[in-house]
Amino acid sequence: MLKRISHIKNIGAFQECQARPTEFAKITLIYGRNTYGKSTLGDIVSSLQKHDPSAILARSSIPGTDQGQLVDMGFALEGQNEGDGRALFRRGIWERGLTNTHLLRVYDDAFFHEYVFVARKFTRDTKVKFSDFILGSQGVAAAQLIEQKKQEKRQKTGRKRSLERDALHDIEALDEFIATEPPASIDELISLRDKLREEHSALNRQKKDAATIRGRSNLSSVNFTPQVDEGSHRLNQLLQTSVETHHEAAKAQLDAHVRNHCHREDGAERWIQAGLSYNNNKSCAFCGQLYSDDAKMLLNAYQQYFNEEFYRHERYVNQEIERCQPMLSVTLPSPEQHAIKQNEMVFQTYPELADDAEFKDLRARYQSCLYDLLELSESATAPLTSVGKHFEQALTAKRARPHQAFDVVDLGDLIAKIDNIAAFGASLNQVIDAVNAKFDQFKKSINDHEIDRRQEKITTQGTSVSRKILRYEKRAACAEFQELNESIAALDIEIPQLEESLRSDQSEYLNNFFGTINRYFTALGSHDFELMRGLDRSGHRPVYFLKVKFKDQDVNESDLDKVFSESDRRALGLSVFLSSLDAMSAEDLAKTVIVFDDPVTSFDDHRVTQTHKKMIELSSRCEQIILLSHYKEGIAQFLQTHAFSNNHDIKLITIIKNSESSGLEVGDVDKFLLTLHDDCREDIIDFIERRVDRLKYRPRVFLEAELSYRFGKQIREHNISNDNLRARIDGLVTNGIISKSVSIELHQWRETLNPEHHVFPGNDVEDQRNTAREFMRFIFHDLVPAGSVGI
């Protein structure tokens, strides 16, 4: 049992608590006012139970010191050294925890909120913790095993999917593939696969070539335009044109002048024509000499020659030369070079016909025709050049003498050569048509059916070989996949068996446990409720929780706060805790120290007696009961009911507090059980007997309470007013309960004790003691019912 808490330092209100003399008993009641440190003690024992320092670290004293936190607690079996069971918290950890000879169970707010309610609700987390709590270590181990198995199945299923996605993807008939025995070696299979691939590729090329052949181009025809350009003929017609004039004398004079006076006849006529534009018919434009009569007659002849009709014809000749000369492209038509080159490339795309006799003959004819055509084109170059020069000379002369007719340029030889070239061109195109017919015949002879049949056979064989090679390469992944499949299948059988076993093994235990909760809950004052076992299978392991009925109606979990009062919720938490203790083995319970932190409060008055009764019953089976409470009336009731029995070892310890720290000391049970009125009486007596020099309570308040206690029955029966002390005293006299003389003295004490807020009048302490002595003599000797004799 816990013998003592020797030392607490820098934890909450206990900045420096040395409490080694304060020894605990079998049943130890620890009373502390709010803020004195009762909850801190609860956190200390809870931290020790869980071996978790967080609750202590969170309660560092304010202001703290640099000496660190410390808890020194002594546990001991009867007859053993207390030091053997020492629990020590230091340097932020429990350096020494509970030994195997002791167990510790704590009921506090943390238990209530962790295992039963959170914000007046059952949550998933509280259900899981509640389930673990009621199942105990063995049941939790079984549930955890189920959870582990489900987790293992989930992981293996995930790994299996990963293998399917990464290592075994795109494999058809995967189960059959995995079930196939892998070959011992794949060297021969690889060689066979490579050979089949080569054969398949060859057939692919053949098939591709067949399609290509059918899509090959034919030869293009070589087009000709075998004629002399229109410009050549029109210019020949222009050369033959002339101007007829009636001024023959003028023409003769002009010709004679050109012959006799011009060094060059070419251009002389044009020069004279231009000179007329500068003539004024009076004098020479060069020297200014006046014209002679002969000169005037000659100029007149010139003007008659170059008349309007001459100029009109000149303009016509020049315009026609300008219009037709660009059309003068007297060139020989020749085969299209692009078509010839394209056809040569087409011939190269039919190597399959190289040995065909008919094709060879056609190819030779094509080459011969093309050669002759090119040769004819070349031989026509000289006539072509000659024609060009003749036209150039003729047109120059025509421009000089537009009125004069000239001989035409001879085109006969050139036209003959052009016609010859055209004939050979037609022959060439005939050969091209014959070659194209041969090409079409060849392309139609290509057949894909046999290639497809052979390819299909090779593909089937190759697929089989490749699948065997792949099975060898994937042998590790397949082995793992098979193992996962077998393991998952085994887990699919094992998990339901474990769940059924857990249900079967724990069914009676859980029925008893939930039955015990119901009995405790009812015994503690919560009636009309029925608590049943619920099972949640949504997670990896089964979770048991409380289902509630109220007056035979199912209560939805969202409505629990409407049917459970705050007191009901605390009683339910305590019922669960007590049921868990009953579920322990007798051996374990016998070495268990049980700490209750405020199991009932002032709001649970109707539950106090039964709660204390359950603790007393429990104390005979466990090692020790420790009750922490700030509910003084509840502690007092426990002491009044059980402290004076010879069957129980009960000790009261109170938490005291000064300006520096809270501490622990053994409480005076008799004094603790005093009512406020009793305490006030003892205070006045201590003051009279000089044990204290100052009163804590007001004598006037004591007087009013004494009247209520002493004459309570009469005051109730006669419905005496309780509005004020004067009215009460008068009511007691009127109804014959006290004598007139007693009422007079009561009024005197009422007035004497009334000044300065019911404190004795006078500042002298001895005067106050004397007044208090007389007051108490009156209370205990003179304040008696009417007809009684004062003692």
Image (cartoon, rainbow, N blue to C red):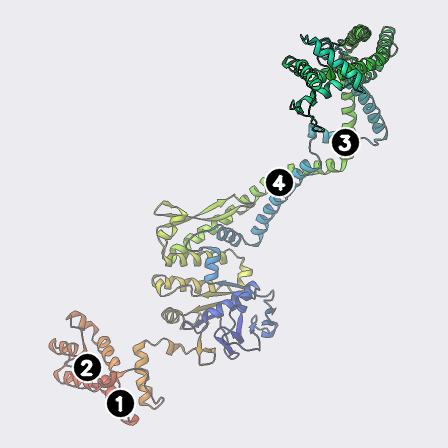
Mark 3 residue element: helix
Which numbered circle lies on residue 773? 1
Query: Which mark is nearer the camera, 3 or 1?
Result: 3
The answer to the question of whether label 4 and label 1 lie on touching residues, with beta carbons closer than 8 A, is no
Three-letter amino acid code at the position of disc 3: Leu
Disc 1 packing (10 Å; few <14; some 14–19; many ≥20): some
Query: Which mark is nearer the camera, 4 or 1?
Result: 4
**Which residue occupies the foreground of this view, 458 or 178?**
458
Q: Using the rendered view, name the quadrant where residue 368 is placed.
A: top right
Q: Distance between the residues labelled 2 and 3?
A: 115 Å
Query: Which mark is nearer the camera, 4 or 3?
Result: 3
The residue identified by callout 4 is 494
Disc 3 packing (10 Å; few <14; some 14–19; many ≥20): some
Mark 4 residue element: helix
Q: How far apart are marks 4 and 3 (CA)?
A: 34 Å
Three-letter amino acid code at the position of disc 1: Arg
Q: Is residue 172 above or below residue 694?
A: above
* Residue located at (72% from left, 13% from top): 231
Q: Using the rendered view, name the quadrant where residue 446 is placed.
A: top right
The answer to the question of whether label 2 and label 1 lie on touching residues, with beta carbons closer than 8 A, is no
Q: Distance between the residues labelled 4 and 1?
A: 87 Å
The residue identified by callout 2 is 784
Whole-percent x and y of residue 253? 73, 13
Disc 4 packing (10 Å; few <14; some 14–19; many ≥20): some
Sequence-earlier tag: 4 or 1: 4
The residue identified by callout 3 is 470
Sequence-earlier tag: 2 or 1: 1
